[in-house]
Amino acid sequence: MRRPGVAIAAAAAIIGIGVMVVAGLAGGALREQVIPGLSDAGTLTRWGLPVSRFVMEAGGTLTVGVLLGAAVLLPSTRGVLDPHAVRYLRGASWIAAAWAAGAAATLIFTVSDILGIPAGKIVGGSELSSYVGQIPQGTALMFVVLLAALIALLARTAATPGSAAGLLVVALVALLPPPLTGHSSSSPNHELAISGLAMHILALSPWVGGLIALVWHATHDGDHLGVAAGRFSRMALWCYVAVGVSGAANAVSRLPDPSLLYTTDYGRLVLVKLALFVVLGVFGYLHRERTLPALMAHNPKGYARPAVTRPPWAFVRLAGVEIMVMAATLGVAVALARTAPPAVTTNEDAVTSVIGFPMPPPITVGRLATMWRPDLFFAVLVIVLAGLYAAGVARLRARGDAWPVGRTISWGLGLVTIVAVTMTGMATYSPVLFSTHMIQHMVLSMLSPILLVLGAPVTLALRALKPAAIRGDRGPREWLTIVLHSRTLRFIGHPATATVIFIASTYTVYFTPLFGYLMRAHIGHLAMLVHFLASGILFFWVLIGVDPTPRKLPYVAKMLLLFVTMPFHAFFGIALMNLGKPLAAGWYTALHRPWGTSIVADQHTGGAIAWAFGEIPTFIVLIAMVFQWYADDQRLARRLERRADRAEAAQTDDELAEYNAYLASLDKRPPSASASPPQE
């Protein structure tokens, strides 16, 4: 029973390494290259670097897959992990240890390759610490080593679905630093390359690792296989689409000329990877049409294996071959990482090398509306949020439930505002003009969040999502409920915490060196915009959110909190207008913008925008608060009337019914009679 899983894993490893060697030799990454004036690090480094990188990437993918199987694919019972899932967590500990070792070896061999020094001398020298402390690629690899080691330690004792899910999130985060500091950060269109590569890694790892974990489970345990396979199939389809879109984005960013696909070694490796990707799509189709229906027929309920246990060989055989194709794809990907992209002969100036595109012409209203610069991250974010919301509304209407049209309109307008400042001319001018960047900041933190929270997405999800098939299991609806009741959300959702984050983060970003540091890299600028949006959603969710909050404030307290908070943004704008030196001076000076006002004058304009913009969200929030207050009073009045009607029908005491009876008695008494209301 244990041989099929071991055989598939061994065959996949051999195929992956073999394909990596062939692709590396074909692309030139593994061929010895003698460059006059530069020393060679030696054969050990030349071959050890791709092998250690393969171990690192395979270890990360397997760690994600095993944690995914334990936390998501296998059902839990009343908040307790399945015994098989607990064993997989322990296995993830050993795999994560191998991941950390592979990352450490990759770090050593990388320093050896860059400096041309044999790897043995790197371990005992100071070159390693200098590389980690000064070079982003070295810092990224050390980050992976630390996080993988942390997963290896914590997975030894984790035993709940929440802890397994937390480790899964940490593993996904640990996958990102090395690829984001590689070729993508220096490609001509590094905005598209960085976003595309991050999306590629986050979609590929659960897909590949999850399938390996599923096949291992099918050949070793088999309990709940139908449920796990069904959940994986639904996830794999979206992962396949995301991998295809992000892979195309990466190819476009590095190969702007289609002829480079077949005239360069890098392009030919991309074509091989594309062919393998198409083959994987065929395997996915065969799974959906043949093996999954047969698997469910073999185990119709999906939660327990029949008395006669036997592995579903049709599924295992097809998935085993698919894993080998995935291993070959991973080998090509490692070879691609070691193969330099073709040098594009363009007249690239200093501005293009920094921001990824030439200096735009002088800003005008027409150019803001026409010089669109789509961002892959925000494009995918808007499409996913719009699609999920529309699917939720459609599901409610299909079963006859109503959903307010105003909430749908508010959600749509919120997404439109995100598009307006992240993919139009605003995105083109925001890296070179502080005033345009400030418009982005104000819209994302003070306008888009108001419209989004009024759309009530959490309430829609809770109504549209179906409960788990068995009691005590955790499906999407249960995970959402757990997050809403978590201690973390209760802390950050406290009005005081949300207000501090909303206000203090603005001052911290702009009045410390952090702003200049974040502007120097696309990933930093992207993280800054995402933080502005998230902090705004958190604050306005507490104030006017329709969705349930950890702590409900009375409307008087909400208005007081609003009027206390808004002046801080006005003070922030005034402070910017009074600054005599530019923020992020090194960044804006390096751009050498040849048109427009000076850097300080543009900064003063940005301060004026921040000072004046606060009136718009304040007005919208006040209107929303008044309507919500009125609606709550009407609901309370109707509730009291229904209570009184029930009390009158049952002839029981009720405060409102008693008071109405008292008023009726006044009409029946003579004018001289005196009466007093009943005492409480």
Image (tube, rainbow, N blue to C red):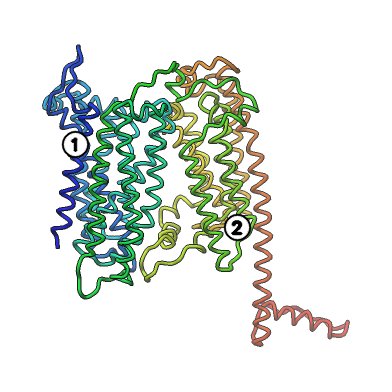
Q: For the point 88% across and 82% down, which residue is it?
A: 671
The amino acid at mark 2 is: Pro
* Label 2 residue SS: loop
Residue 613 at x, y percent in the picture: 63, 36
Q: Earlier in the sequence, mark 2 or mark 1?
A: 1
Local packing at callout 2 (Cα closer than 10 Å; few below 14, some 14-19, many 20+) is few
Left or right of 280: which side holds 29? left
Residue 46 at x, y percent in the picture: 16, 27
The amino acid at mark 1 is: Ser
* Label 1 residue SS: helix
Residue 492 at x, y percent in the picture: 46, 50
Q: Nearer the viewer, residue 286 or 518?
A: 286
Q: Could you say which disc has been placed on residue 638 in the image?
A: none
Quarter holding the C terminus is bottom right
Question: Label 1: which residue?
Answer: 52
Q: Contact, CB < 8 Å: mark 2 with mark 1?
A: no
**669 relative to 108, above or below:** below
Residue 490 at x, y percent in the picture: 45, 55
Q: Residue furthest right?
A: 671
From the viewer's perspective, is the residue at label 2 or at label 1 nearer?
A: 1
Q: For the point 22% across and 31% down, which residue is it?
A: 24
Q: Nearer the viewer, residue 636 or 82?
A: 82
Q: Is residue 548 visible?
A: no
Left or right of 6: which side holds 266? right
Q: For the point 30% across and 31% down, which residue is it?
A: 268
Question: Label 2: which residue?
Answer: 554
**409 relative to 119, above or below:** below
Local packing at callout 1 (Cα closer than 10 Å; few below 14, some 14-19, many 20+) is many
Q: For the point 55% across and 55% down, which residue is it?
A: 390
Left or right of 312: which side holds 441? right
